[in-house]
Amino acid sequence: MRADRLIQALLLLQGRPQVTAAELARELEVSVPTARRDLDALAMSGVPIYPTRGRGGGWRLIGGARTDLTGLTEGEVTSLLIGLTQSLGAEPERVAAVRKLVRAMPAPFREGAQRVADATVRDIPWGEVQPASVSETVTTLQRAIAARRQVRIEYDGTQGVVTRELVPLVVGSRGARWYLLAAPAATEAGTADAERLRTYRVDRVLSASALAVPGAAPDGFDLAGEWARMVERVEDLRGSVRATLRVQPWAVRALTDRFGAQARMLEGEPDAEGRAAVEVSAHRIDALAEQLAGWTSVAEVLGPPEVRDELRRLGERIVERYA
């Protein structure tokens, strides 16, 4: 709609010293003549913009780029970006909205907003089917990233509850679970030590607070690449034990949805009973057996023997408890 384009054009003019028709056309995904007509329409409607001719020319707001046309403060802008990035789903419309909003922001606000957008990942689930509400901890971490501040967290890990002062670098989710990629500062200026990068589960963060000391990623730090490497490592841990099943055809979809990336269909024809071959995996034998126990009526574990034995022991414990 043209009204929507005019608002976007006004926001772009607000956020930049000057905008050319070609730049506006790229941002709004329209032709250059359409962009020129939109700029003319803004000027005719009373918006204080004017064109500058010649080499290096373009359209400007009278008085230069201003930060008060929307009435948003820097804190409100950051809150808006945090809300958009935390929203479930990564459909093209939401991604485009974040991108356009960041580009349209006033220059003083844009840097922090861009850090939030770049450092927040919404990823495909690891077998999760129910979304969870986003904790205040995620918001605290995102605000620290926007402000380039270190955080102090209390973390309930394998060594018990520990306190860490870290530079938050990436906040992301796989399904309903959120993760933090962070590292201690390596310099007095607060540059993160990428060699000491660690992954923290946000649901195990007991408390988090931003510190009044700087903290930022080192130059050239690959946010997306580090997230992808973390996912690969966790996938390897989660999938170190595998089992082959025969599953009733009507239950295949439900089982593979539940196991998510830890399930895959195997090649080959169904057996005499019409059951399909499926492989599932987990990080430990007992964990895999516990997950499979609920599927006993529709799935038979063919192997390995260790998983079958663990299922038998689990069944014996259930019988002993409830006999």
Image (cartoon, helix red, strand yellow):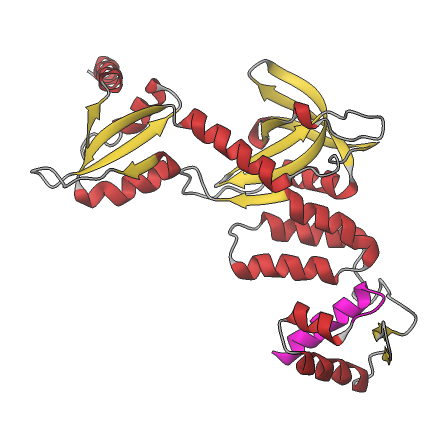
For image coordinates 50% across by 28% down, the residue present is 233
Quarter residue 294 falls in: top left
Is residue 135 in sight in this rendering?
no
**Quadrant where the N terminus is found in the figure:** bottom right
**Quadrant where the C terminus is found in the figure:** top left
**Does residue 250 appear left or right of residue 40 in this picture?**
left
Q: Where is residue 71 in the image (x, y as percent from the top left)?
A: 81, 63
Q: Compared with residue 181, is residue 129 higher up or lower down, i.e. above or below?
A: below
For image coordinates 90% across by 74% down, the residue present is 62
Q: Position of residue 9 (x, y in %)?
A: 73, 72
Quarter residue 36 falls in: bottom right
**Does residue 117 appear left or right of residue 129 in this picture?**
right
Task: Residue at the far front: name it.
Answer: 55
- Frontmost residue, 211 versus 214: 214
Task: Residue at the far right: name it.
Answer: 63
Is residue 133 in sight in this rendering?
yes
Q: What stretch is highlighted in magenta?
A: 1-19
As for residue 17 lying within the magenta part, the answer is yes
For image coordinates 81% across by 64% down, the residue present is 16
As for residue 2 lying within the magenta part, the answer is yes
Q: Position of residue 141 (x, y in %)?
A: 68, 37
Q: How many marks?
A: 0
Quarter residue 230 falls in: top right
- Frontmost residue, 217 versus 74: 217
